[in-house]
Image (cartoon, rainbow, N blue to C red):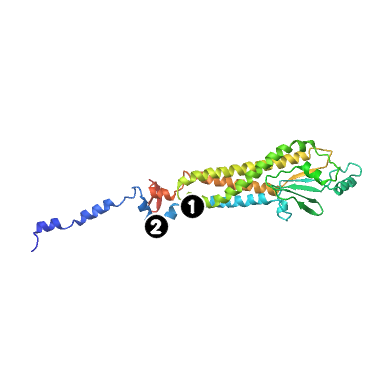
Amino acid sequence: MGFPAALRSRLRPNTADNEKRHDSSSPSPSSPVSKEQAAGLSNAAIKRATRMRRGFALSASFAYVLSWIFLILVLIGNTHPRPVLSSIYFFKLNLADIIPTSVPNASLINSIAQSIGLHDFYQVGLWNFCEGYVNVGITYCSPPRTLYWFNPVAVLMSELLAGATIALPTAVITILSVLRISSQIMFGFFLTAAVLAFLLVFVSPLAVASRWWSLPLAMVAFLHATLCLAASTVGTAIGLAFKYAAEAQSDLNIHAEVGVEMLVFMWLATGFAIWAFAVHSGMGCCCTSRRDLRIGRRVLREGRVERQ
């Protein structure tokens, strides 16, 4: 027995109404994207949306890698008499012709100075010092020691024969206390910066997930850049000040030079650290993150990322 036509029309589902209700229940392109809806986005779409942020995060990680490499070169420089390491030093004292040639029998006196224990040159690194002769090269490097600082008076007097003395410029003696404090501060800063750079290499990509990661990363990056900048400034100042003080005494023919390789490595590490800090600071306010897509701060419309 069939139903009347009027009842059948009321019981039959209204296809148009169902489609309308279905369309109204689906999110519009401008509505916030929920976490579940964000999970439905394809990986390709997420990668396209976060491409710029991911690129900056990877560039920061690469900058930390380079900064760490140059910091390691600074740390291991002058620790062993090897071809590469021996050329990495903060400053170098040349005492080969400590008595000027204008003095009678200067060559003989310089030969006597060498015979009683005085070497031709002394070069200083972060952990120790090395000594040697011009025609031979480095003959000895002191054992590496933490918080090392170069005391030229103690080193030279310990190598001369008993009762032998050597006059050093007054300017060199007056800066010994400043040299000790500055060298120890520089040592701690370089070592801490190297540890932070190594850790930040692996932590930096977390900034792709959320802007909230950019704040702590930017703070740690600022600390790392500050340590590199301060240590490099101190190291440069020590080398230049020691060169000026050593050559200030005209009565002695002492020459000093600043290690170019060490300066280059220090400031390259500092430059990459500053770049990484700038990247992390910028990612705090720009570039789409995964969290932006999840909470609806950024939406995908026709393959483009737009602000909600």
* First-in-chain label (1 vs 2): 2
Which residue is pictured at 63% across the width and 44% down the height? 189
State which quadrant residue 18 falls in: bottom left
Location of residue 3 in the rendering, given as x and y in whole percent from the top left corner:
9, 60
Q: Amino acid at mark 2?
A: Ser
Q: Which residue is disc 2 drawn over?
A: 42
Location of residue 82 in the rendering, given as x and y in whole percent from the top left corner:
73, 56
Rendered-image quadrant of the N terminus:
bottom left
Instruction: Name the side, left or right, on which 134 lies relative to 267.
Output: right
Residue extending furthest toward the bottom: 1
Disc 2 crowd, CA 10 A, few/some/many (<14, 14-19, 20+):
few
Determine whether label 1 and label 2 are within 8 Å by CB: no
Q: Amino acid at mark 1?
A: Arg
Which residue is pictured at 71% across the width and 39% down the height? 179
State which quadrant residue 47 falls in: bottom left
Q: Is residue 34 above or below residue 168?
A: below
Residue 13 or residue 226, whichever sits in front: 226
Residue extending furthest toward the right: 104
Rendered-image quadrant of the C terminus:
top left
Residue 2 or residue 167, whichever sits in front: 167
Q: How many numbered tags mark residues here?
A: 2
* Mark 1, secondary structure of its residue: helix
Instruction: Name the side, left or right, on which 80 lies relative to 5.
Output: right
Between the residue at mark 1 and the residue at mark 2, the CA separation in whole angstroms equals 17 Å
State which quadrant residue 44 falls in: bottom left
Instruction: Name the side, left or right, on which 15 lies relative to 98.
Output: left
* Mark 2, secondary structure of its residue: loop
Q: Which residue is disc 1 drawn over?
A: 54
Disc 1 crowd, CA 10 A, few/some/many (<14, 14-19, 20+):
many
Residue 74 or residue 176, whichever sits in front: 176
Instruction: Name the side, left or right, on which 89 lies relative to 219.
Output: right
